[in-house]
Image: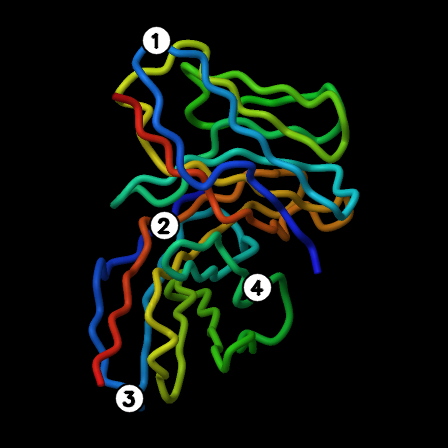
Amino acid sequence: DVKVTQSSRYLVKRTGEKVFLECVQDMDHENMFWYRQDPGLGLRLIYFSYDVKMKEKGDIPEGYSVSREKKERFSLILESASTNQTSMYLCASSPRLAKNIQYFGAGTRLSVL
Amino acid sequence: AQSVTQPDIHITVSEGASLELRCNYSYGATPYLFWYVQSPGQGLQLLLKYFSGDTLVQGIKGFEAEFKRSQSSFNLRKPSVHWSDAAEYFCAVVGVGGDYKLSFGAGTTVTVRA
């Protein structure tokens, strides 16, 4: 089974802090994604990566950056956390030949106070 | 750009009753369509997908979905609901071709009463 692991289930941070959300997948997938999930809005794509050191902006990249130094790991960075970034963050991965079949992690619920 | 509408925010159904969740999409051609389920505290799990071919698609956990091009719909059904089906369900669409981006609906929360 594909396993996508997000390092934290819950995080509480203060406004202005730099926050790192980590995601690791164990299936050698080329593609990795970060989504934000908010009630009534579904999932919105923040960034995705189709290869090591490659990244593309999604629908809502403002206030976020990403890093992909190794194939299995995709990090989401909040440079200066704000209260409006309080949300559930979901990581996903997919293989190159089936890029639309995405496998999700359990999510990180981030609260910014 | 493609978009997805799930008209029902919340549905309550009795255990053993049938369930139908609605999904309408907007896209210029036939897209790829997906249904995901999210149980409380969990990530999203793929229930089923439609790429082409037979318009009635079977998925896991006894779910099926029917693609209707004329109605731009991809409704999810289950004949007999179990208490463990209580969850949030998301419909998603992506354009055929090189697009990576899944567009998700807002989700439908299903409550199962005994």
Q: Secondary structure at mark 4?
A: strand
- Rounded to the nearest whole Å, what is the CA distance between mark 4 and mark 1? 41 Å
Amino acid type, residue under disc 4 in the picture: Lys
> Are tags 2 and 1 found on a single chain?
no
Identity of the residue drawn at 44% across and 69% down: B68
Identity of the residue drawn at 57% across and 64% down: B49
Q: Which of the two marks, 3 or 1, is nearer to us in this view?
A: 1
Check disc 2 and report the residue beneath it: B105
Q: Position of residue B57 (x, y in %)?
A: 55, 75
Determine which quarter of the picture holds residue A85: top left
> Are tags 4 and 1 found on a single chain?
no
Amino acid type, residue under disc 3 in the picture: Ala
Amino acid type, residue under disc 2 in the picture: Gly
Determine which quarter of the picture holds residue A59: top left
- Rounded to the nearest whole Å, what is the CA distance between mark 3 and mark 2? 24 Å
Pointer 2 chain: B
Q: Secondary structure at mark 2?
A: loop
Check disc 1 and report the residue beneath it: A16
Dot 3 alpha-carbon crowd within 10 angstroms: few under 14, some 14 to 19, many 20 or more:
few
Dot 4 alpha-carbon crowd within 10 angstroms: few under 14, some 14 to 19, many 20 or more:
many
